[in-house]
Image (cartoon, helix red, strand yellow):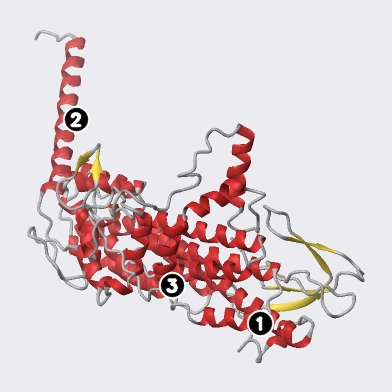
Amino acid sequence: MKKRNPIFLLIHLAACCTAVIFATFQATEAAGRDNVRAKPQFTISRETTFFTEPIRADGSIDFVEAINQRFGEDVKPEENACIYLHRAFGPIKELPSSFYAKLRIERPPAQGQHLQPFPLPLKIAELPAERLEKVLEDAEGAVSHPWTRQQCPELGAWLDAHREPLELVHAAARCQKFYSPLSDEFIFINAEQTKGPAPLLAVLLPGASKLRMAARMLCSRAMLQLGERNAEEAWHDLIACRRLGRLTSVGPTLVETGVGYSVENMGSRGMLTLLQQTHPSSVTVKQYRSGLKKLPPLRSIPDIVNVSERCTYIDALLTIASGQSDAMELLGMEPDVGKAAHMFRSVPIRAFDWNEALKKGNAHYDRMVSAMRLPTHALRRAAIAKLESDLQQRATLRNFDPRGKRGIETSQAFAAVIAAIMLPSAAKVREGEDVLRQTASNVEVAIALCEFRNDRDRYAEQLEQLVPKYLGKMPVDQFTGGKQRGQAWTSKLICNQFASPRFVPVPNSSVFGSAEYFDHTGYKIACPQYPSPIPFSLCTAWFGFLRR
C-alpha cells in the first residue's frame, strides 16, 4: 500500500474544515434572513398590540394614527396652543404638509417674523472675539438672573426683534389644550425618502426644541423686565412660560413631556428669582396666587408611558419582526435598539413566538406603570430599580444567545432585551416630575412667606407658622415624603450676576436677621434681603429648590 504524503492530508483536512465552516455560515445567514423575511405571526389584541385599530393595508397597526386619535380627540383649532406656537415658529422643513393639515392650518409662510435662536436675525459676527464671547455668556445667564439693556444691548435688541412672535407664544399660553400630531412621513436615510411609514421610535419632534427656545426667550425677557424694575411684565412672561410647560407636557411622547417639564421649571425658577428681587404688595401677591391656581392640571408620567411609550416599544418589536430594511435602519436612532435589530437578523432563531414576546413586553410596561404610580419617591425608585435588575438578569444585549433554547424562552428573553433598553428613559423623566412638583411647591411656599410678611411686618421663623392661613397644609418633600422643615438661621445671601445664589453664615450678626427654610434634600429655600419696618432686620431669605 502506497503511503500518502502528510502535506496532502493536511490540505484535505483544511479543505473539509473550510467547507463545514462555509456551510454553517450559510445556514446562519439563511436563518437570519428567515427571521427577517418570514411574515411574522402575531395576533392583534389588547394583550399583544395594545391598540387593535386602525389597521394598515399590510395588516399592521398604524400606531401613529392611533395615538393621534387618542390625544387629538375633541381638540378644536381655536383652543389648540400648538397652532399659535407653529405660527410663531414659522415653517419647519422636517414637517410634511400632512402635519399642518392635521392641525387644520396652512403651512406658515417663509416670510415674516419667526422665532430664531440668538443672535439671529442680528448680525453680531463682526464683533471682536472677546465681546462676542461675553455676549453669548450673558445670553446664557440672562435666562435666570436679572440684567439690563446696558449690560447686554445685543440681547435686548434680539428680544425686541421678536416682539411679534412672542405675542403668538403668549396667545398659545392662553389656550386650554395642546395637541401636536405625530407624523411618520418625511423621514430620510442618506438623503433619500424611506419607503413606507417610519417606526414610532423614529418620528421626529422638531417643535420640541423650538418650544424650549421660546421658553428661554420668555424667561430672558422676564429677567430683563425685572432688572429694569418692571415686575408686573416679568410675571406676565413667567406665568406664560409655566402655562406653556403644563400644556405641552400632556404629550403624547416622553420627549414632549420632558421638554414641557423643563419649560415649566424655567418659569418656576424665574418666579423664585422675581420674588427674591422684589417686595410685592398684598394685592400683587393675591394676583400671583390667582394666576397659579389657573394653571392647567399637571399630567403624570405614567399616563404617557402607559400609552405612547408602550406603543413605541411594541412598534419596535413589530418593525424588527417585519424586517423592512428602511424601517430597521431607522431603529438605529436609538443605537442599542438598532444593534438589537441587527443582532436578531444575524443569529439563527427557530420557532420565535411573537405573541409571547409582545405579551411579555406589555407585562414589563404594566409593571413599570404600576411602579411609577406608587405614592412615594422611595417606593417608586425601589420598584423601578427592581424591574430594571430583573430585566438585566433575564437577558441583555451582550449576553442574548438563543442557541439551545426553546422558542418561548427566546421570545421572552428578546422582549426583555428591548425593554431593558427603552424603559430607563421613562424612569428618568419620572424623576423629573418629582423635581417639577417640588419646585412648584416651593413657589407656593415663597408666596405664602410674602403674604405672612405683608400681614405681620416680619417673616415666619418656622414654616409651621404659615399653616393654615397662608398654606392649606405643610409642604411635602417630594423626595422623602416627609414635611419640609424650617429652622432659624443667621445668614447672608450672596448672589452673583451669573452664578447660583448661595448662603454664607454670618454668626451673631446684628445686621442680618433671617430664617432659612430647607427640605430634606439639603437644598435651601430662602427669601430676599430687603429693608423691613422692624429695626436691625432685613427680612428672611428664600430661594427655590433647584435640586438638579
- SS category of the residue bearing label 3: helix
State the image coordinates of residue 535 (x, y, percent, origin top left). 89, 78
Q: Which residue is mark 1?
A: 448
Q: Is residue 131 above or below residue 66?
A: above
Q: Nearer the viewer, mark 3 or mark 1?
A: 1
Vertical placement of residue 208 versus 294, above or below: above
- How many residues crowd mark 1 within 10 Å: few (<14), some (14–19), many (20+)? many
Looking at the rendered image, the disc whose residue lies closer to the viewer, 2 or 1, is 1
Residue 543, horizontal then vertical, whole percent: 68, 68
In this view of the protein, which residue sits in the foreground, 245 or 172? Answer: 172
Q: Residue at x 39, y 53 (%)?
A: 114
Across and down, in percent, residue 266 comes to 54, 63
Precedes in sequence: disc 3 or disc 2: 2
Mark 3 sits on what residue?
372
Of the numbered discs 2 and 1, the one sitting upstream in the chain is 2
Q: Amino acid at mark 3?
A: Met
Q: Which residue is mark 2?
A: 21
Please identify the quadrant where the N terminus is shown. top left
Q: Residue 172: x, y in percent?
A: 39, 68
In space, the residues marked 3 and 1 are separated at their CA atoms by 30 Å
